[in-house]
Image (tube, grey):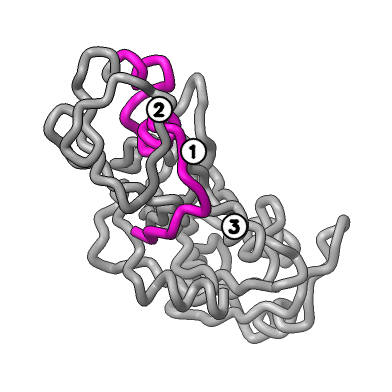
Amino acid sequence: MDVKTMEKKLRLDKYLADMGVGTRTEVKGLIKKGLVQVNKEVIKKPEIKVDEHDEVIVAGEQISYAEYEYFMLNKPSGVVSATEDRIHKTVIDCIDAKRNDLFPVGRLDIDTEGLLLITNDGELAHELLSPKKHIQKTYFAKIDGVVTQREIEQFKEGLDLGDFITKPAHLVVLCKTESTSEVEVTIYEGKFHQVKRMFEAVGMKVTYLKRLSMGSLHLDKELPIGTARELTKEELSQLKKKG
């Protein structure tokens, strides 16, 4: 977890709401009931100001302030890359976090699995998603079709998808049969359905897709599908440094 210095003191109710203790109304209720202590003193006023140097305890649990949080999710199929959805489970539902301001950095199709970064750091998200940054993304894919050197060269040259021409992509064949292929493909954009559309452009179909990496961040092979963990300090440092 990236704990940053607060630029200014916050109202106690906002501090607690930001950390997922409850809504501002719910937090005020806890404060009025005498369940909140600041520096070992019971506080009854939600407007008092606190910062990261204060010891804030709610119902016996210490609440430390973290301005930003960063999670690596191994997204399963059937889950949507959104903060809320009336029909499907969302990627946020897979995160064991109390705060309500988390969002996915970019999106994976509902049937695509693999690496997805979840955070509330808008500045980092913008850097990673900016078209000017050309952050690389690597996928494992199963293909209905036999990938040959011809397709490898086409991906390397860039493909005309109608609304845009892809940047040179790196396509590696891992194995293949008489009718199917397993590949890794690295792209430098993040257009809608891009990997699927690239293979469609060469007459093939993606039957399974999993994102393995985004910039310097690689999917933890030990992370079970459908679960998430916080980024390590090293992972976060590299992500901020190089994307």
Residue pointed to by mark 3: 125
**Magenta stretch holds residue 20:** yes
Q: What is the quadrant of residue 171 in the picture?
A: bottom right
Residue pointed to by mark 1: 101
Q: Give the farthest residue toward the left.
A: 60
Stretch in magenta = 1-29
SS assignment at label 3: helix
SS assignment at label 1: loop
Residue pointed to by mark 2: 13
- Residue 195 as seen in the image, left or right of residue 14: right
Q: Mark 1 is on which residue type?
A: Asp
The answer, for residue 34, to whether it is visible in the render is yes
Residue 193 coordinates in the image, percent (x, y): 66, 52
**Mark carried by residue 119:** none
Residue 42 coordinates in the image, percent (x, y): 20, 27
- Residue 225 as seen in the image, left or right of residue 124: left
Q: What is the quadrant of residue 96 in the picture?
A: top left
Q: Residue at x 29, y 19 (%)?
A: 44
Question: Is the residue marked by circle 1 packed among few (<14), some (14-19), or many (20+) residues within 10 Å?
Answer: some
Q: Tell me if residue 25 comes above or below residue 190 in the rendering.
A: above
Q: Looking at the image, which is closer to me, 125 or 87?
A: 125
Considering only order in the chain, which callout, 3 or 1, is on the residue closer to the N terminus? 1
Q: Residue at x 59, y 52 (%)?
A: 122
Mark toward the viewer: 2 or 1: 2
Considering only order in the chain, which callout, 3 or 2, is on the residue closer to the N terminus? 2
**Magenta stretch holds residue 11:** yes
SS assignment at label 2: helix
